[in-house]
């Protein structure tokens, strides 16, 4: 398995690594953990040893469990279990509504994947991979929001399972091309991070929605496919490309910068980009970064849906 980085073509777990773990792992597989604050001072600086080692640890875990069955992967967690399959199934429409998420009506301009929007490097990649670049035709865009900024400022709440929960201001935006087998993550802020940003504190116990992981939102969109108004995805196992578009996360950028040093480079290349094998420290650190681990959890917790990748 290999991972590729380019200027716009971003990024193709052991709980002990001390990084954010989705709800399934947090609640059933490990003690509560929270994502540590970024130690990178500037995005153009290579990652510190602490950031690098944590990301590499998580990426190495993903690489270990990717080829395993769901049951065998469960044996790699503590306590051991028979499955690490996500509890959330299908298109998630009812579950999203229950847990305070709404889907925004996006304007056409928000879902553009042409050269003007993302540059020639992206267009070259899309053409070679057979993904297409036309929004709402080749690629369908989803944006899920967990309350508005006004909901957060007004401490507005919703009710799920007879309990009141606060809106967090989280959001997840991504594109789906089911025919080409691609998911394109674009602009995302999940509930735990949204509370830290909007409330300037860590989430309180029992405050977060049960449905809170980007990997689950991504699968819900993938299940719907790129023509959700007329039909669902006819082949959910046809998942081939996991793409982070326009990476801006400072910690991820610092990991990319350090990975490039191994190639004696300081900037990423246009398509076909820079490739890092998953057997290397660099490949594993990229996979364990904020922009990589969303894909790690998706592949690990969806084996029964998409197969072993």
Image (tube, rainbow, N blue to C red):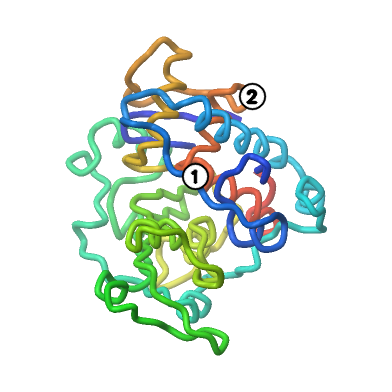
Q: Nearer the viewer, mark 1 or mark 2?
A: 1
Name the side, left or right, on which 149 lies relative to 214. Answer: left
For numbered disc 1, what is the local secondary structure? loop
Q: Which residue is rendered at x = 23% and y = 35% of the image?
A: 119
Q: CA distance from mark 1 to mark 2?
A: 26 Å
The disc placed on residue 36 is 1
Residue extending farthest to the top is 264
User: How far from the left and from the top, in percent, is residue 174?
Assistant: 38, 55
Q: Which residue is rendered at x = 35% and y = 54% of the image?
A: 139
Quadrant of the image occupied by residue 149: bottom left
Residue extending farthest to the bottom is 162
Name the side, left or right, on which 87 lies relative to 147. Answer: right
Residue beneath label 2, please?
A: 279
Name the side, left or right, on which 73 lies relative to 281. Answer: right
For numbered disc 2, what is the local secondary structure? loop
Crowding at dot 1, Cα within 10 Å, few <14 / some 14-19 / many 20+, comes out as few
Q: Is residue 129 above or below residue 108?
A: above
User: How far from the left and from the top, in percent, is residue 38?
Assistant: 42, 39
In the image, 230 versus 117, the foreground residue is 117
Q: Quadrant of the C terminus?
A: top right
Q: Is residue 35 above or below residue 280?
A: below
Q: Which residue is rendered at x = 82% and y = 58% of the image?
A: 82
Q: Which residue is rendered at x = 61% and y = 69% of the image?
A: 89
In the image, 106 versus 162, the foreground residue is 162
Mark nearer the N terminus (1 vs 2): 1
User: How far from the left and from the top, in percent, is residue 206?
Assistant: 55, 72
């Amino acid at each position: 398995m290999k991972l590729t980085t380019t200027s716009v073509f971003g990024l193709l777990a052991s709980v002990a690594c001390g990084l954010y773990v989705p709800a399934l792992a947090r609640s059933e597989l490990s003690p509560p953990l929270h994502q540590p604050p970024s130690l990178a001072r500037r995005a153009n600086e290579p990652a510190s040893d602490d950031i690098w080692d944590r990301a590499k640890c998580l990426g190495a875990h993903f690489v270990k469990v990717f080829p395993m069955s769901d049951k065998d992967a469960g044996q790699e967690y503590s306590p051991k279990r028979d499955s690490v399959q996500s509890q959330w199934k299908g298109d998630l429409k009812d579950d999203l509504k229950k847990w305070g998420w709404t889907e925004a009506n996006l304007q056409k301009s928000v879902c553009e994947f042409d050269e003007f929007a993302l540059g020639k490097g992206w267009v070259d990649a899309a053409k070679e991979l057979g993904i297409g670049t036309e929004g709402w035709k080749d690629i369908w865009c989803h944006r899920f929001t967990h309350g508005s900024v006004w909901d957060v400022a007004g401490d507005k709440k919703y009710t799920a399972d007879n309990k009141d929960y606060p809106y967090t201001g989280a959001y997840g935006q991504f594109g789906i091309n089911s025919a080409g087998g691609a998911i394109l993550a674009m602009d995302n802020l999940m509930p735990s991070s949204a509370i830290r940003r909007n409330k300037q504190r860590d989430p309180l116990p029992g405050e977060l929605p049960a449905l809170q992981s980007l990997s689950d939102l991504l699968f819900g969109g993938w299940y719907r496919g790129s023509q959700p108004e007329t039909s669902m995805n006819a082949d959910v196992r046809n998942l081939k490309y996991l793409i982070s578009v326009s990476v801006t996360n400072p910690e991820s950028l610092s990991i990319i910068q350090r990975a490039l040093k191994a190639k004696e480079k300081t900037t990423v290349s246009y398509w076909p980009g820079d490739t890092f094998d998953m057997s290397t420290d660099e490949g594993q650190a990229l996979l364990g970064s904020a922009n990589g681990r969303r894909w790690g959890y998706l592949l690990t917790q969806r084996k029964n849906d998409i197969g072993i990748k």
